[in-house]
Image (cartoon, rainbow, N blue to C red):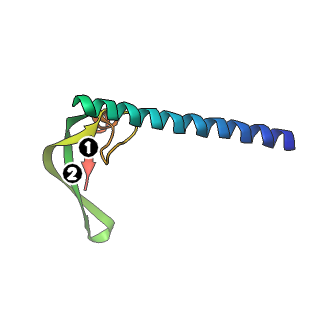
């Protein structure tokens, strides 16, 4: 049992190292793109407002479309979502 637990801990350590390394390289590439002026883009998103009503009901109102700034990276960076994610999920709920 200890051998199995040690092997699992090694795999988790390697996985965490790879994910941290991927995030750091994503950040570095975003900084390079920022120096070239191509780090951010905009995506049109549909905005909806969810208003709670009586009886545990909810009313959904379409508020329109709006441009949303996104980062051209794998992970959300600089407080903006990743463009690949935002293009696949263009609906925002408020």
Picture coordinates of residue 58, whole percent (x, y): 27, 61
Check disc 2 and report the residue beneath it: 48
In which quadrant of the rendered view does residue 15 lie?
top right
Question: Circle 1 is placed at which residue position?
Answer: 91
* Residue 87 position by quadrant: top left
Residue drawn at the location 85% of the way across and 39% of the way down: 3
The image quarter containing residue 34 is top left
Mark 1 residue crowding within 10 angstroms, few (<14) / some (14–19) / many (20+): few
- The residue shown at (52%, 35%) is 21
Q: Is residue 18 left or right of residue 76?
A: right
The quarter in which the N terminus is drawn is top right
Q: Nearer the viewer, residue 67 or 49?
A: 67
Q: Residue at x 25, y 68 (%)?
A: 53
Tell me how many marks there are: 2
- Provide residue 90's location: percent of width, then percent of height: 26, 39
> What kind of element bears circle 2?
strand
């Amino acid at each position: 049992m200890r051998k199995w637990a040690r092997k699992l801990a090694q795999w988790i350590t390697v996985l965490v190292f790879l994910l941290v390394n991927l995030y750091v390289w994503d950040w570095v590439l975003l900084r390079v793109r920022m120096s070239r002026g191509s780090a951010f883009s905009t995506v049109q998103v549909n905005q909806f407002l969810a208003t709670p009503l009586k009886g545990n009901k909810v009313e959904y109102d379409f508020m329109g479309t709006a441009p949303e700034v996104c980062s051209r990276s794998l992970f959300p960076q600089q407080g903006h979502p990743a463009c690949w994610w935002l293009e696949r999920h263009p609906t925002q709920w408020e």
